[in-house]
């Protein structure tokens, strides 16, 4: 396997007796967009959370940006600053304004001057399309707006890699598109992205590769075109059959 | 029987009651401040994901919570020989800090785990996560239970009368010893204690409203 | 062994270790005079039993008084409701020691005769228990969702039947942990009746300490007596409280 910016080498992880990652090997090249999908409980979120060490692994090795992940707290903290992450539930800080949410890490982790951090934050809020909400609090925003702030917050650290953990699954249908647009923009700008999502339209449009996981294993890994039309594994085909039939407005094909 | 009450006794002993009130006030204030500092520190340590820290802090809170205030007070004063005022303050601080530690820990736990994940993913260290992300959110959550704790400090401060610290309760006993007017003295002291509690509750309610935010 | 079981075992071992460490440390520091204390043990244990009796009898009296108080505060007519609220809040804002003095000083005025310290202790602890338990009961009743009452009324049950068969059973289950927590608090409060001369566990130790020079041994016994009693009740609380089972 060629060296990528993210590399999983025979990674295993257990939650108690549950084998959540079972011999996972995977490489993501710089600038690539990789979409990870699979049924719930398949280990896809755990896979993502291992990349910035929110979860530790039990066996195998993960190499990020040329350095193997280990347990040294300072190294991990420094590494996390280079990897942005966007969560399903946004996880904005409810006690801080939108602007302060975006500025906190640049100020405290990077040690930037206040006006510099502010300039970065305002620039990014404009980029995700909500410059007018800078002084609002998270509770005053719609879900879609909150998620766009969360993306701006992650980008404010100037990350090399962006991780997305089901960024649209907590959103009302009419807000999914505005978040996906921002993500497409990022992908087209050359950002390395690992995205856990069931938005297959997004995968088709910008993904370089799609990874399908089931029961902790990588079952299938292919370019989107092949993935959607020529999936080899029956589990992949069954999964695709279920989620592609759930497009709103279409009759459910699986019944 | 009630007509035999003599309320003028309170006026006669106004200086004693006033001094007692002041003593109760400052002992309570130091007790509140000290137990908050100690309790929040222990509570923060208890919330760190480390089995050793959890056991240590649990031992601290369980041990102190399960012993009556008076036991700690008498141990410090009569067995270890700590002078009365320091013994009184230390007792109030140790006792309430255990409860405040539990309140703090529960408050920190009630902040969704995603907040910590977000902080970690942006490269914050644990100190920054506590300082900038968790504690500001916890502060608001814990104000109502903290109010109860602070009222408890005021109430527990009465126990120091038993080692002759001249607080409000002590003066009540003195008046009773000198004049057998325990009923009148106890009534006065009780009204004053309730007034102090009311002030504490009022202040905390205002603080809560101030922090209401968005 | 499952994960929860091994956690519990670990915790038990930890506490055992703490207990042994405390005893060993105390032994080393002061060479405890166990022999001097031993003859007093039956006296001390009897007194511990007396403290238990005080706590249990007064919490029982407290429960009986607390129900009408709580119901008045919740459903009573206007004037009475404020009166109940005022009484409950006043007792809760007054130092326990003051309440004990109060009962001790007031009794002669109301009853016209002197009161024994034991009765004053029982009376004051019952008053304290009643005030706190009234709040526990009120919170328990309030914790039953309004939808439960609506469903019951909608099915044609009267208000009284609804309270008896829908609200009360759920409320009782919800308030059990808080009720036992009050027992712990009250047990610790019994130590304050020392101040009016009742021979409870605390006074028994204090008296023995004056007769025998073994302060560390006596305070170890004192601490152990209260700690084990309260800790035990506290653990029973956890069995009843599903929240703790999730946290552990």
Image (spheres, coloured by chain):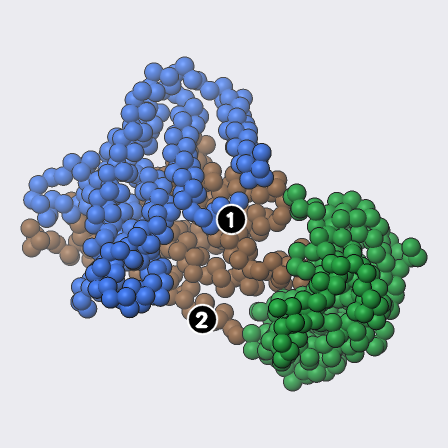
Q: Which mark is residue B209?
A: 2
Position in image of residue C192 (x %, y %)? 30, 39
Which one of the lettered chains is coloured brown?
Answer: B
Q: Residue at x 62, y 62 (%)?
A: B115
Left or right of A36 in this view: A97: left
Q: Report the residue marked by disc 1.
A: C246
Q: Residue at x 21, y 64 (%)?
A: C158
Q: Residue A223's image quarter?
A: bottom right
Work out whether A5 lies above or below A102: above
Which one of the lettered chains is coloured blue?
Answer: C
Chain letter of disc 2 in the image = B
In the rendered picture, chain A carries what hue?
Answer: green
Label 2 sits on a secondary structure element that is: helix
Instruction: Kindly indicate whether the residue at mark 1 contacts the one at mark 2 (C-beta within 8 angstroms).
Output: no
Position in image of residue C244 (x %, y %)? 48, 47
Q: Residue at x 36, y 63 (%)?
A: C145
Q: Residue furthest front?
A: A255
**Image quarter in which the N terminus of chain A is found:** bottom right
Q: Nearer the viewer, residue C78 or B185?
A: C78
Left or right of C135 in this view: C4: right
């Amino acid at each position: 396997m060629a060296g990528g910016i993210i590399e999983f080498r025979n990674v295993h992880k257990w939650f108690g007796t549950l084998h959540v990652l079972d011999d996972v090997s995977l490489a993501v090249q710089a600038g690539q967009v990789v979409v990870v999908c699979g049924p719930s409980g398949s280990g896809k979120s755990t896979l993502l959370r291992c990349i910035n060490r929110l979860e530790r692994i039990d066996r195998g090795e993960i190499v990020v940006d040329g350095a193997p992940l280990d347990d040294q707290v300072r190294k991990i903290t420094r590494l996390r600053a280079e990897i942005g992450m966007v969560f399903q539930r946004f996880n904005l800080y409810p006690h801080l304004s939108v602007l302060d949410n975006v500025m906190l890490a640049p100020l405290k982790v990077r040690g930037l001057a206040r006006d510099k951090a502010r300039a970065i934050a305002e620039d990014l809020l404009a980029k995700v399309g909500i410059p007018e909400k800078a002084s609002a609090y998270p509770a005053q925003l719609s879900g879609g707006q909150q998620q766009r702030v969360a993306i701006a917050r992650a980008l404010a650290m100037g990350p090399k890699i962006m991780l997305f953990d089901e960024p649209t699954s907590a959103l009302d249908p009419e807000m999914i598109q505005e978040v996906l647009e921002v993500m497409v923009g990022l992908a087209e700008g050359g950002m390395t992205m690992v995205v856990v999502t069931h938005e297959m339209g997004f995968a088709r449009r910008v993904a370089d590769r799609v990874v399908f996981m089931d029961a902790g294993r990588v079952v299938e890994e292919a370019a989107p075109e092949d993935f959607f039309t020529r999936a080899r594994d029956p589990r992949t085909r069954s999964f695709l059959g279920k989620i592609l039939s759930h497009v709103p407005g279409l009759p459910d094909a699986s019944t | 029987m009630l007509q035999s009450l003599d309320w003028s006794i309170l006026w006669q002993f106004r200086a004693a009651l006033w001094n007692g009130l002041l003593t109760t006030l400052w002992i309570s204030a130091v007790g509140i401040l000290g137990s908050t500092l100690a309790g929040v520190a222990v509570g923060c340590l208890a919330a760190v994901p480390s089995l050793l820290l959890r056991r240590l802090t649990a031992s601290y809170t369980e041990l102190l919570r399960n012993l009556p205030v008076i036991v700690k007070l008498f141990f410090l004063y009569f067995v270890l020989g700590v002078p009365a005022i320091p013994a009184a303050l230390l007792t109030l601080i140790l006792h309430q800090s255990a409860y405040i530690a539990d309140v703090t820990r529960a408050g920190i736990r009630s902040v969704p785990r995603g907040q910590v994940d977000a902080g970690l993913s942006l490269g914050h260290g644990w100190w920054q996560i506590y300082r900038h992300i968790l504690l500001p959110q916890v502060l608001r959550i814990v104000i109502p239970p903290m109010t109860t704790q602070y009222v408890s400090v005021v109430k527990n401060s009465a126990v120091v009368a038993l080692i002759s610290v001249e607080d409000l309760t002590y003066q009540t006993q003195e008046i009773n010893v000198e004049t057998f007017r325990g009923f009148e003295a106890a009534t006065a002291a009780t009204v004053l204690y309730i007034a102090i509690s009311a002030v504490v509750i009022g202040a905390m309610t205002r603080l809560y409203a101030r922090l209401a935010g968005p | 062994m499952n994960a929860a079981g091994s956690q519990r075992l670990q915790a038990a071992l930890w506490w055992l270790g703490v207990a042994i460490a405390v005893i060993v440390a105390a032994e080393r520091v002061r060479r405890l005079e166990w022999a001097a204390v031993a003859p007093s043990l039956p006296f001390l244990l009897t007194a511990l039993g007396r403290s238990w009796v005080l706590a249990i009898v007064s919490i029982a009296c407290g429960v009986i008084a607390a129900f009408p108080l709580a119901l008045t505060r919740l459903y009573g007519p206007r004037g009475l409701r404020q009166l109940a609220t005022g009484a409950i809040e006043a007792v809760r804002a007054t130092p326990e020691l003051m309440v004990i003095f109060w009962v001790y000083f007031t009794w002669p005025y109301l009853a016209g005769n002197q009161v024994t310290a034991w009765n004053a202790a029982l009376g004051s602890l019952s008053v304290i228990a009643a005030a706190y338990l009234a709040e526990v009961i009120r919170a328990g009743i309030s914790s039953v969702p309004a939808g439960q009452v609506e469903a019951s009324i909608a099915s044609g049950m009267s208000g009284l039947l609804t309270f008896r068969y829908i609200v009360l059973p759920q409320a009782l289950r919800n308030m059990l942990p808080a009720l036992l927590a009050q027992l712990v608090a009250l047990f610790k409060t019994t130590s304050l009746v020392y101040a009016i001369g009742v021979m409870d566990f605390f006074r028994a130790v204090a008296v023995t300490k004056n007769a025998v020079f073994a302060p560390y041994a006596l305070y170890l016994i004192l601490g152990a007596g209260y700690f084990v009693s309260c800790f035990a009740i506290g653990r029973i609380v956890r069995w009843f409280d599903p929240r703790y089972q999730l946290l552990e």
